[in-house]
Image: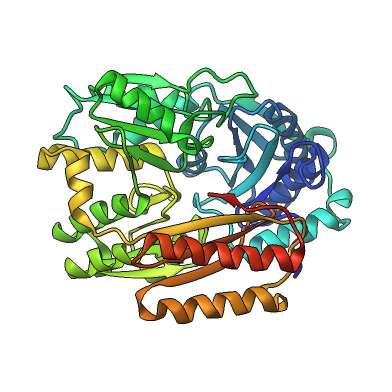
């Protein structure tokens, strides 16, 4: 069915406009609770968490009202990372979890994403069933009345529960004593939890991006602006820096020299060490079509292999669950260690990386520079006012075909629409950085000419 509300990662948009209104949040809360009521005999328990956007208050109360209208019990966590809500949904035996966040987007945006009682994001068919309820009349006929109306309560211990869980994923024979770590929480959901995790394990923590005011999430901080974390690493002479995004489900790593480490190199490091330890199930890493050929070569050199899926951490997780894999991720910094978490978790991923550093007693710059041979890759974003199926863009298709002929077996071309923004993304990979940049611009220019739009914006 055509999807009215849900995109590739829940519902997302400008807060209090379009599909991101309190009315939509109310109906989502009601639909999630109504669905849960068909499966359980008790009043459904729904965990609701959020990041630090000012509009979070708006949607938190609207969701709670929707849940209560259907006789559910709302467990409000306050600001908390997306993976923390997924964890609490399972650990508290809740029937669903809902996160209010637009991840790396600016504060003016917000989003809603749903986790099932197993802590995993919902598959497409379940999201479509929720949409059908949201636009239909069944919810209005089934509202609870009298003593059946639900209630809401705040879980004051939520952040502490999550901190204890995350610390438990770190090897018990290791500590972070003596390490200097910069944490940039992007003024987002992990502003309390992340510094606590690393300091309680023994590290000397220099925390930035930990003063949210409702408007500064992701602004000049965090994974969207890792250059600030890089400066802090050099200033503090830290061993490593970790920049999280607004909902803390992804991670950007800064080495001790103040350089951003490519996400593919982080995946290569973790996957090869898991291979050597016999811990990578089926000797396979799951990643997306955006990941580099160099990552594929690094896995092959260690006797492993790589499976590619569509862009989006939910598709990585789906493939892992279907085929029995236990590690996957995205070049953008989503890393999923399925034996520990049901979704990407930036703090957890940082701890896994630190355990490798400590066991091998080597700086992150050495470890990542040796693990894979980088292949030049360029990504150009083309802002456009309207989507048109690529199959209906002949000039763009011709530019893509010409590029593929030029690169032959030495590179790749990937052109796709963003799942969360009105942008066409053009990725080109090949042996010559200058050549692939020109190829990417040619494709972007063809798309702009075809849709007569504004200049490209480099990623």
Query: Residue 246, position in %: x, y?
Result: 53, 35
In the image, 377 versus 435, the foreground residue is 435
Q: How many marks?
A: 0
Please give the name of the residue rendered at 24% of the width and 61% of the height, measured from the top-left corner: 280
Query: Residue 198, position in %: x, y?
Result: 30, 26
Q: Splitting the image into 4 quarters, where does residue 21 fall?
A: top right
Q: Splitting the image into 4 quarters, where does residue 425 fall?
A: bottom right
Image check: 431 left or right of 6? left
Please give the name of the residue rendered at 75% of the width and 70% of the height, measured from the top-left corner: 1
Vertical side of 9 occupied by 357: above or below: above
Please give the name of the residue rendered at 75% of the width and 54% of the height, measured from the top-left corner: 5
Query: Residue 215, position in %: x, y?
Result: 65, 24
Query: Residue 171, position in %: x, y?
Result: 20, 39
Q: Please name the colour scheme applied to the rendered image.
A: rainbow
Q: For residue 447, say whether it is visible.
A: yes
Please give the name of the residue rendered at 42% of the width and 32% of the height, measured from the top-left corner: 227
Image check: 88 left or right of 326? right
Image check: 405 left or right of 60? left
Vertical side of 155 occupied by 123: above or below: below
């Amino acid at each position: 069915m055509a999807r009215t509300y849900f995109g590739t990662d829940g519902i997302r948009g400008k807060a209090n406009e379009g599909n991101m209104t309190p009315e939509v949040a109310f109906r989502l809360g009601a639909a999630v609770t109504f669905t849960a009521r068909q499966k359980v005999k008790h009043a459904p328990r729904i965990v609701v968490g959020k990041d630090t956007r000012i509009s979070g208050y708006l949607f938190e109360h609207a969701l709670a009202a929707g849940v209560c209208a259907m006789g559910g019990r709302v467990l409000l966590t306050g600001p908390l990372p997306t993976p923390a809500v997924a964890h609490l949904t399972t650990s508290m035996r809740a029937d669903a979890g809902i996160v209010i966040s637009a991840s790396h987007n600016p504060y003016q945006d917000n989003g809603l994403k749903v986790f099932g009682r197993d802590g995993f994001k919902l598959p497409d068919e379940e999201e479509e069933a929720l949409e059908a309820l949201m636009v239909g009349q069944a919810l209005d006929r089934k509202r609870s009345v009298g003593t059946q109306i639900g209630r809401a309560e705040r879980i004051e211990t939520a952040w502490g529960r999550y901190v204890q869980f995350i610390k438990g994923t770190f090897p018990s024979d290791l500590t972070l004593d003596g390490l200097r770590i910069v944490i940039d929480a992007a003024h987002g959901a992990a502003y309390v939890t992340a510094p606590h995790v690393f300091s309680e394990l023994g590290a000397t923590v220099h925390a930035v991006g930990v003063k949210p005011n409702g408007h500064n999430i992701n602004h000049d901080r965090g994974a969207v602006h890792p250059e600030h974390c890089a400066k802090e690493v050099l200033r503090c002479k830290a061993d490593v820096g970790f920049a999280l995004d607004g909902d803390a489900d992804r991670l950007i790593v800064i080495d001790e020299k103040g350089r951003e480490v490519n996400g593919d190199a982080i995946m290569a490091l973790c996957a090869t060490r898991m291979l050597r330890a016999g811990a990578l199930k089926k000797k396979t890493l799951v990643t997306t079509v955006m990941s580099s050929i160099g990552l594929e070569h690094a896995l092959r050199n260690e006797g492993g292999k790589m499976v590619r899926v569509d862009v989006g951490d939910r598709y990585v997780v789906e493939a892992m669950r279907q085929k029995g894999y236990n590690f996957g991720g995205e070049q953008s910094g989503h890393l999923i260690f399925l034996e520990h978490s049901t979704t990407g978790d930036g703090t957890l991923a940082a701890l896994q990386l630190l355990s490798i550093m400590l066991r091998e007693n080597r700086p992150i710059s050495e470890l990542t520079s040796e693990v894979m041979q980088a292949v030049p890759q360029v990504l150009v974003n083309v802002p456009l006012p309207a989507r048109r199926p690529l199959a209906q863009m002949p000039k763009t298709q011709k530019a893509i075909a010409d590029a593929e002929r030029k690169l032959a077996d030495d590179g790749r071309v990937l052109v796709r629409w963003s799942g969360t923004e009105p942008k066409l993304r053009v990725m080109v990979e090949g042996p010559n950085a200058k050549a692939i940049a020109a190829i990417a611009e040619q494709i972007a220019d063809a798309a702009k000419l075809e849709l007569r739009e504004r200049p490209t914006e480099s990623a």
